[in-house]
Image (spheres, rainbow, N blue to C red):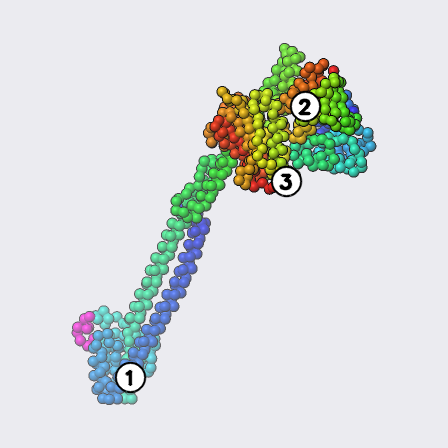
Amino acid sequence: MALPAIMRTTAARLSALYVVLFSVCALILVLYMTSMSERMLTAQTQSTINEEMASLGRAYQRGGLPTLVRLVSIRSRQPGANLYLIADRNGDILAGNVQNLNPSILGNEGWTEVPFAYQSFAENGEAAQQTAADTTSPRDAIALVLRLPNSMTVMVGRDLGEPKRFRTVVQRALMVSLGTMVLAAFLIWLVVGRRALRRIDELSGASRRIIGGDLAQRLPVAGTGDEFDRLSESLNAMIVRIAQLNEGLKQVSDNIAHDLKTPLTRLRNRAEAALADDASPEARREALESTIQGSEQLIRTFNSILMISRLEAGQTTVEPFVPVDLAASVLDVIDLYEPAAEEAGVTLSSAVEAAVSVSGNRELIGQALANLIDNAIKYSRAGEDRKAEVSVSVRKQGEDVVIEVADNGPGIPDAIDRERAKERFVRLDKSRSLPGSGLGLSIARAVMLFHGGRLDLQANNPGLRAAMVFPHPKEAA
Amino acid sequence: MKILVIEDDREAAEYLQKAFSEAGHTVHLAGDGDSGFAFAESGDYDVLVVDRMLPRRDGLSVISGLRAKSVATPVLILSALGEVDDRVTGLRAGGDDYLTKPYAFTELLARVEALDRRSSPREQETVHKVGDLELDRLSHSVRRAGRDIILQPREFRLLEYLMRHAGQVVTRTMLLENVWDYHFDPQTNVIDVHVSRLRGKIEKGFDGPLLHTVRGAGYILKAS
């Protein structure tokens, strides 16, 4: 990955900004601290020199020049001593540990604030050897010069080597730490930026593959539970949902292709047969009639699909729900189907336990119920050594009102199949041979969802129990 | 019968004109809401067939406009909108019947003929007669050739509807709508079974059929 690409990442920009801000703050802090400590050291040095000078002055008053010279000689020889010098009026040095001094320094009485160069003068050989390096190179110092009444000069000074070394050390530490910091920040920034960039690249790569139609793709989850993982997990959940919807849509279009193309092909074949030269007028008439019947069936299927989609999308602005007497609805629909059931050899019975009203649409509820009864009659016929029976009941079940249509046919033994049977166009294998569009249960379910209820399919052992469940019906009597 | 068809789809309108003419009716065409309203207001039509979506003036507005001017001609609304509430708003605007596109012409013809004003006086009759079959709405009794026939309440209503429209084709959906008050499509032959039961009761043991099946359309009650 090229650096400019890293620079474009948010993480890299943020860390670069942090490094710059932090460095500036650190620099200011260190500068402030060094200047403070330097000033403190200088003040301390000056007060030491003042005290030293005062004690020399007291010695001079007590014993005159010889005492002074002796004291200076003693102090000069102590390890880590200050700088001492006593010179006569000609500038010749009488006592002290300083030599090669710029004469102008002694000429100015008072503080020599500007550090000057000097060479220490060791009075014994040992010291001279130890400080051999010191004696050869000039060193910086500050000093206080005082002129005695006899025109002699006394100087007390202090080597500036220590504060200077301190400053150098601090400066070097500052440089090193700043350098390390910048380097570390750069490395962190490189790692974080690369990592963020890599994960975003992975995310967008996976997204592009998904956009490309590969809904089996999932966004990578690193397992760290960080923001990227959370984002990936949410997006993955979304993809699963989209894949489900997509699958449903695909199934519906496959089914439409099958369930509409087959009858369309049949229509076309019949029309072609009717056009054939050797067809008799009766055969033509028959072919045309069956063509019309076939197209009516197709229109019916289309209307059902439209109805389901509108109900499912909640786009139907059916008249404000009105009280529907479920018992009356059940009796109406049973009355409608009773002769057909009898002709099919099915006993259709009803048990209305509760006279209940729900708020809804009578037409839709009637249609859903008709579909369930129609199915029940169709399948209970398949019962073998027992009498085919369909019973419809209306009852209260806790807070709900349930219309149940039970048959004693083969039923749908598998719970997954029972759920699947409610899908559009799904016709379980056993029922493929029987007439029907595969939309009856879907319509019933859509109607129930539209009424805020649900359609339950349960095993009746033997047979199927289809229940239209209206939750919490408003008593609208 | 004189029919006005207000329909903007030229091909559909011409097909209707031809088909109604073959069935022995006179048809006038109007291609938009404004001219349709003008024709319907001035002409003496027995039935209006109005498409719901029309250029210039909406079908429902044409109908409510006519009703506001006390034009009581029966109206059948044709619409691509087939929702329950679409039907309700259509009928509320003053329509007498509602048919969803695409429709079978036989269905449209049967419904238009059922709307014919000339047949409406039968609504007020208390006794319907077809051949030797008699139905008394007040005493709820049915007799044929002087013999009482016992009918279930629903069978009675079915026969009553058929007799009121005697001599006219009545489709299965018309029966479902008028006898059971449901507008959905019964998937199976439920209506046919009802009709054949009724036929058994009014024909078995009597002379001559009364209730005939019209292939591809429905039923017709008439004395042979």
Provide the residue designation for mark 3.
A477
Look at the numbered disc 2 and give the secondary structure of its residue: loop
Residue B28 visible in the displayed image: no
Provide the residue designation for mark 2.
B151
Residue span colored magenta: A122-130
Give, as a three-letter code, the residue at label 2: Leu
Which residue: 68% across, 22% down? Answer: B150
Left or right, residue B73 beside residue A323: right
Between residue A339 and residue A244, name the one nearer to us. Answer: A339
Left or right, residue A259 beside residue B153: left
The residues bearing labels 1 and 3 have C-alpha atoms spaced at a distance of 117 Å
Which residue: 43% across, 51% down? Answer: A11
Co-location on one chain, circles 2 and 1: no
Give, as a three-letter code, the residue at label 1: Ala
Q: Residues within 10 Å of mark 2 (few under 14, many from 20)?
A: some
- Which chain contains the residue that carries disc 2? B
The residues bearing labels 3 and 2 have C-alpha atoms spaced at a distance of 31 Å
The percent coordinates of residue A114 (x first, y second) are 34, 75
Chief secondary structure of the magenta portion: helix
Does the magenta portion include A126? yes
Left or right, residue A227 beside residue B50: left
The percent coordinates of residue A444 (x first, y second) are 57, 32
Provide the residue designation for mark 1.
A54
Q: Residues within 10 Å of mark 3 (few under 14, many from 20)?
A: few
- Quadrant for the N terminus of chain A in the image: top left
